[in-house]
Image: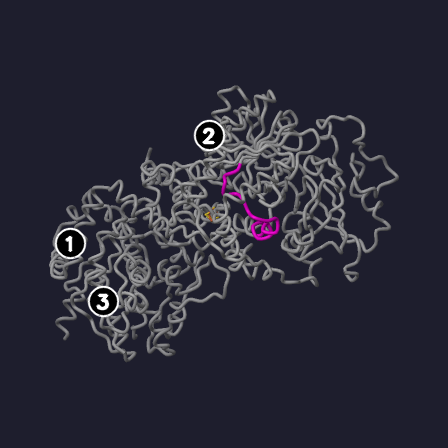
């Protein structure tokens, strides 16, 4: 099984430690993981702004970079969702259909492809899980609170395997943080308010570290939290699942 | 017209009011959760409702003809209106024929859409909205901000002031019970003296020519059962094939709206009562156009429960008026561009595409996917220059791995080296109320290259 | 002739634009029978909807119970259960405007729905006085225990083709949440809603 690692552009540039944690974690779990060096972005920023048309070559580049892999794993539910659901704008050849099926968000891959039962991780902190929307409602990595069915969450069940970690329950367990790509800029006022409200919910419930399957949500939350000197940290879930202390 | 983001910015100047508004509407969503969780096969029910509605769209012409035939045989008058103007004229003609001077109206988003009230006022017809929420905004000369709770943006103290001014009530400190009683007394007179009553239609049944109106207040019934003339106004999409399908929709509607198992009153009208005249006005107003589009026709399945508004984190924090359209919120953002693409071009962007609306919708409209699709169309037809430039730059950078690497290095250096005053200048909207991430020395790619 | 034109235009446009779906609709899956708990469910859900209930094993003392509920107020009884006192009479040509003076109405319910506590009435049980249950301050409905069905699906099945000109599911009093979500009972009409269930549930 040959697995390609896709590190989204903003993680590559701003949060390399998340990429490192993802790689180390997968290696620890015994995955043959490769990182194709010509990768850039999945095309989502353009598409979500209404410029799908400008993103086609970026999509094609993604396919070119990963076509030889059995799976693509990425520490971003949002990018995985984009590849799976919005790569219908390019010609659907064998490579494209293969990758649309086999691009996985990290936790999804660990739980459902690797079927990992045990994680050798520990972190003695109170952690709040931010359910990133594209992972939760897009990729169905859990049961959104809107639906009537058995409650479950892949990210949550992995976090529960981390020794010493206390998972905190929230008042609104899966409300959006307000990042939304260019929404963060074009609808700045609401974006900030949504972020603030999420932070308040976590802080009020005693969370020390907010985690998520998407760094973009956390970048937005961290930006607001730092600006307001709030007593809370952010860590991508890969960092937590890879932590030893 | 203000764009959604401008209006939202205004609304957010008073943060405690935003919190109040968000909480009030979230309360509806919480109640909805409690209500729907009592039905174990909720997902199947939604699926079936969605299928029935697709069946309706696929046979809309024949169902409408069947409905008309049956309604006529029940002694009901049937009218057809291509657009809002024609609808208004039809209503006015009926009223003139009966020399109606006083009219009571229960909640109907369609008559809002057609601007019926201002039209009739021109002809000196007194028109009184009888749903309490609608009455409040009518007295305040405002527009509804929500489709099931039209005055949800108003605080009780404001309603108190309004009633003092308009109804001459004594001050009550915003006592809701007192205010409702005051409205009740005032409206009772209006009901008893009305020459005609207008209602909306929640569902119209093709096989029987009947229609159903749902309220909690009973205002629709009080109006029509007393008045000599009943005019019911419906969009063409309100049809359902059979009576038995109501079982599905009545289970979904109130639960989705606020968690109630059913509204207090679900009234089924088939024939006028003795001595009464009953009219139905069937209105298109752009709906048949929407039907043509495979991407957007599903929006016609909407049963106007308001659940997508209640769940929408943006709606809750920007208020219904920020949308500037008759129907606000997520569903309004996919219906309105069909009416006027340019005017409503900011609405499909008033979303993070979080998808919560799609998952609460009782008829499974793919709302957030339609928002995404409208974005593509809007940017083709009315491109926003600044965004376009930015996205073209993105395109270049992301298509070329070498260029991407270089831009990354430059950007990270810049963040590190530039003084805060330059970094957080006016053009950096991200940084106005948020810190930029710390720029690491090395990108992941650089680290990886060194490692191997 | 404008109406004819618009009608033709609308229907033509729909024909041109409509999708072509052939999915079969099956409501059979929703007929999950839970008859056993129907009466309890009915009562619980009715209370949730701000209504009230009374269960009488036998109809013998119905008049007594009703008179106690009426408590001396003016009433209109369409059920014929009250014989010792004068009900409001609709035979005289009394203007509907006077009907605001009736305080209590007593009407037979035809079907009760367990999942929401709603009672179905139609022109027959309302004796064509459609305004009545909407204009009085207090409504009382008499419902035979055997008429309670589990869900709305069962209710429509039981109704079959509705032959009267009007019918309604009434599930509670007139209420509103339009002022800051405060639930206020008695927005326009009834401020209370009572269902008297007659017959013991064992006889189901
Ligand atoms: S789109 Fe769906 S959720 Fe929104 S109002 Fe319509 S039916 Fe309700």
- Magenta region: B234-251
Which residue matches tag 2?
B115
Question: CB under 8 Å between callouts 3 and 2?
Answer: no
Same chain? Circles 1 and 2: yes
Q: Chain of mark 3?
A: A
Q: Nearer the viewer, residue B439 or C106?
A: C106
Query: Residue C33: horizontal and vertical position, in percent?
Result: 66, 62
- Give the distance between the C-alpha atoms of the residues marked 3 and 2, in whole angstroms: 57 Å
Q: Are marks 1 and 2 in contact (CB under 8 Å)?
A: no
The reply to whether discs 1 and 3 touch (Cβ–Cβ < 8 Å) is no
Q: Secondary structure at mark 3?
A: helix
Residue behind label 1 places its C-beta within 8 angstroms of ligand 1: no
Q: x and y percent of residue C97 in the render?
A: 70, 27
Please name the residue that numbered disc 3 is placed on.
A17
Q: Quadrant of residue A114?
A: bottom left
Q: Earlier in the sequence, mark 1 or mark 2?
A: 2
Tag nearer the camera, 1 or 3: 1
Q: Which residue is mark 1?
A: B396
Asked if ligand 1 lies within 8 A of label 2, the reply is no
């Amino acid at each position: 099984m040959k697995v390609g690692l896709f590190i989204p552009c903003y993680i590559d540039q701003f949060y390399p430690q998340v990429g490192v944690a993802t790689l180390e974690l997968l290696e620890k779990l015994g995955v043959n993981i490769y990182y194709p060096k010509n990768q850039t972005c999945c095309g989502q920023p353009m598409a979500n702004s209404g410029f799908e048309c400008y993103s086609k070559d970026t999509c094609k580049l993604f396919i070119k970079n990963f076509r030889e892999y059995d799976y693509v794993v990425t520490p971003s539910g949002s990018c995985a969702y984009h590849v799976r659901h919005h790569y219908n704008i390019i010609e659907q050849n064998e490579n494209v259909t293969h990758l649309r099926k086999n691009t996985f968000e990290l936790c999804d891959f660990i739980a459902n492809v690797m079927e990992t039962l045990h994680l050798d991780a520990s972190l003695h902190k109170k952690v709040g899980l931010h359910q990133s929307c594209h992972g939760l409602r897009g990729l169905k990595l859990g049961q959104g609170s809107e639906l009537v069915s058995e409650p479950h969450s892949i990210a949550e069940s992995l976090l529960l395997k981390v020794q010493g970690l206390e998972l905190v329950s929230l008042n609104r367990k899966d409300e959006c943080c307000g990042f939304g790509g260019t929404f963060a800029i074009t609808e700045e006022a609401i974006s900030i308010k949504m972020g603030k409200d999420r932070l308040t919910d976590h802080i009020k419930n005693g969370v020390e570290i907010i985690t998520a399957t998407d760094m973009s949500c956390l970048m937005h939350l961290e930006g607001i939290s730092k600006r307001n000197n709030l007593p809370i940290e952010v860590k991508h879930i890969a960092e937590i699942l890879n932590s030893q202390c | 017209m203000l764009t959604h983001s401008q209006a939202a910015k205004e609304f957010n100047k008073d943060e405690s009011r935003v919190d109040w508004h968000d909480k009030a509407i979230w309360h509806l969503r919480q109640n909805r959760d409690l209500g729907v969780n009592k039905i174990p096969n909720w997902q199947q029910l939604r699926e079936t409702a969605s299928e029935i509605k697709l069946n309706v769209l696929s046979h809309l012409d024949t169902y409408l003809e069947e409905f008309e035939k049956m309604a006529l045989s029940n002694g009901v008058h049937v009218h057809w209106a291509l657009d809002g103007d024609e609808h208004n004229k039809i209503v006015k003609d009926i009223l003139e024929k009966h020399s109606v001077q006083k009219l009571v109206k229960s909640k109907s988003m369609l008559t809002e859409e057609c601007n019926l009230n201002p039209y009739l006022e021109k002809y000196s017809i007194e028109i009184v909205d009888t749903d309490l929420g609608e009455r409040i905004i009518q007295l305040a000369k405002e527009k509804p901000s929500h489709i099931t709770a039209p005055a949800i943006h108003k605080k009780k103290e404001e309603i108190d002031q309004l009633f003092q001014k308009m109804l001459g009530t004594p001050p009550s400190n915003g006592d809701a019970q007192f205010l409702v009683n005051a409205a009740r007394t005032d409206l009772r007179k209006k009901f008893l003296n009305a020459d005609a009553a207008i209602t909306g239609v929640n569902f119209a049944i093709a096989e029987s020519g009947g229609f159903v109106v749902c309220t909690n207040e009973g205002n629709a019934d009080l109006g029509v059962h007393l008045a000599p003339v009943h005019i019911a106004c419906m969009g063409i999409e309100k049809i359902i094939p059979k009576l038995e399908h109501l079982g599905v929709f009545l289970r979904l509607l109130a639960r989705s709206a606020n968690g109630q198992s059913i509204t207090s009153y679900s009234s089924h009208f088939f024939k006028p009562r003795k001595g009464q005249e009953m009219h139905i006005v069937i209105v298109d107003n752009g709906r048949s156009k929407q039907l043509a589009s495979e991407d957007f026709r599903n929006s016609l399945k909407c049963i106007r429960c308001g659940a997508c508004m209640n769940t929408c984190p943006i709606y809750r924090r920007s208020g219904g008026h920020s949308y500037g359209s008759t129907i606000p919120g997520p569903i309004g953002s996919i219906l309105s561009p069909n009416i006027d693409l340019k005017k409503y071009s900011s609405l499909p962007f008033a979303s993070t595409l979080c998808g919560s609306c799609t998952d609460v919708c009782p008829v499974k409209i793919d709302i957030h996917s339609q928002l995404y699709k409208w974005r593509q169309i809007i940017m083709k037809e009315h491109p926003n220059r600044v965004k376009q430039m930015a996205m073209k730059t993105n395109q270049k950078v992301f298509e070329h791995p070498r260029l991407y690497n270089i831009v990354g290095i430059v950007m990270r250096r810049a963040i590190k080296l530039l003084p805060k005053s330059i970094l957080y200048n006016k053009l950096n909207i991200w940084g106005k109320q948020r810190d930029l991430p710390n720029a690491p020395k090395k990108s992941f790619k650089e680290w990886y290259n060194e490692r191997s | 002739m404008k109406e004819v034109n618009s009608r033709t235009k609308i229907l033509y446009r729909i024909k041109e634009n409509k999708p072509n779906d052939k999915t079969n609709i099956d409501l059979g899956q929703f007929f999950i029978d839970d008859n056993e708990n129907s009466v309890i469910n009915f009562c619980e859900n009715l209370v949730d909807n701000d209504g009230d209930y009374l269960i009488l094993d036998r109809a013998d003392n119905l008049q007594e119970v009703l008179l106690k509920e009426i408590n001396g107020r003016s009433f209109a009884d369409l059920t014929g259960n009250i014989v010792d006192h004068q009900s409001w009479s609709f035979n005289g040509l009394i203007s509907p405007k006077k009907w605001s003076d009736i305080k209590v109405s007593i009407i037979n319910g035809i079907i009760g729905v367990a999942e929401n506590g709603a009672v179905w009435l139609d022109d027959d049980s309302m004796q064509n006085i459609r305004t009545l249950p909407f204009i009085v301050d207090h409504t009382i409905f008499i419902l035979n225990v055997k008429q309670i069905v589990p869900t709305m699906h069962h209710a429509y099945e039981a109704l079959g083709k509705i032959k009267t000109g009007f019918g309604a599911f009434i599930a509670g009093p007139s209420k509103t949440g339009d002022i800051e979500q405060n639930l206020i009972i008695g927005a326009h009409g009834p401020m209370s809603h009572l269902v008297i269930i007659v017959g013991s549930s064992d006889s189901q």
